[in-house]
C-alpha cells in the first residue's frame, strides 16, 4: 500500500431509532443517526405485510366483467 494516499479509518457508532448501536469503521469521523436498521426493519423482523393488488389480467377481467369462457 502506498503511503499518504489512503484515507484514515475511524471506529464510529451508528445509533438507530430503536436504540441499537452498530459499531464499524468508516472514513468519516462523526457518529451517525439511523432511522431504521436490520433490528427494527419489517423485512428483517418478519412483520412485513404483502398486499396482493392483482395483476393486469385480473384488473381487466374485473373492469369488463370478463369471465374468460
Image (tube, helix red, strand yellow):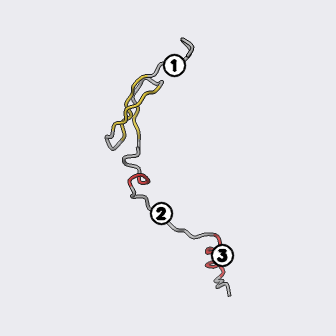
Image depth: mark 2 or mark 3 in front: 2
Kindly state the secondary structure of the residue where label 3 is placed: helix
User: In the visual, does 60 lie left or right of 35?
Assistant: right
Neighbours of disc 1 within 10 Å: few (<14), some (14-19), many (20+): few
Q: Pointers 1 and 3 in contact (CB under 8 A)? A: no
Q: Is residue 31 above or below residue 58?
A: above
Q: Which residue is mark 3?
A: 60
Kindly state the secondary structure of the residue where label 2 is placed: loop
Q: Nearer the viewer, residue 11 or 15?
A: 11
Report the quarter where the C terminus lies: bottom right
Can you tell which quarter of the image residue 61 is in? bottom right
Image depth: mark 1 or mark 2 in front: 1
User: Looking at the image, which residue sits at the far top?
Assistant: 3
User: Looking at the image, which residue sits at the far bottom?
Assistant: 69
Give the x, y percent position of residue 60: 65, 75
Q: Is residue 49 above or below residue 61?
A: above
Report the quarter where the N terminus lies: top right
Q: Is residue 22 above or below residue 36?
A: above
Give the x, y percent position of residue 45: 38, 53
User: Looking at the image, which residue sits at the far front?
Assistant: 1
Neighbours of disc 2 within 10 Å: few (<14), some (14-19), many (20+): few
Kindly state the secondary structure of the residue where label 1 is placed: loop
Q: Pointers 1 and 2 in contact (CB under 8 A)? A: no
Q: Is residue 14 above or below residue 36?
A: above
Q: Earlier in the sequence, mark 1 or mark 3?
A: 1
User: In the visual, does 6 lie left or right of 24?
Assistant: right
Q: Earlier in the sequence, mark 2 or mark 3?
A: 2
Residue at x 33% of width, y 44% of height: 18
Dot label at residue 7: 1
Q: Which residue is mark 2?
A: 50
Give the x, y percent position of residue 29: 43, 23
Q: Earlier in the sequence, mark 1 or mark 2?
A: 1
Amino acid at each position: 500500500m502506498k503511503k499518504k494516499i489512503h484515507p484514515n479509518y475511524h471506529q464510529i457508532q451508528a445509533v438507530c431509532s430503536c436504540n441499537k448501536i452498530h459499531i464499524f469503521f468508516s472514513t468519516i469521523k462523526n457518529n451517525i443517526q439511523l432511522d431504521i436498521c436490520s433490528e427494527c426493519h419489517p423485512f428483517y423482523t418478519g412483520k412485513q405485510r404483502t398486499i396482493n393488488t392483482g395483476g393486469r389480467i385480473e384488473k381487466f377481467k374485473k373492469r369488463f366483467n370478463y369471465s374468460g369462457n
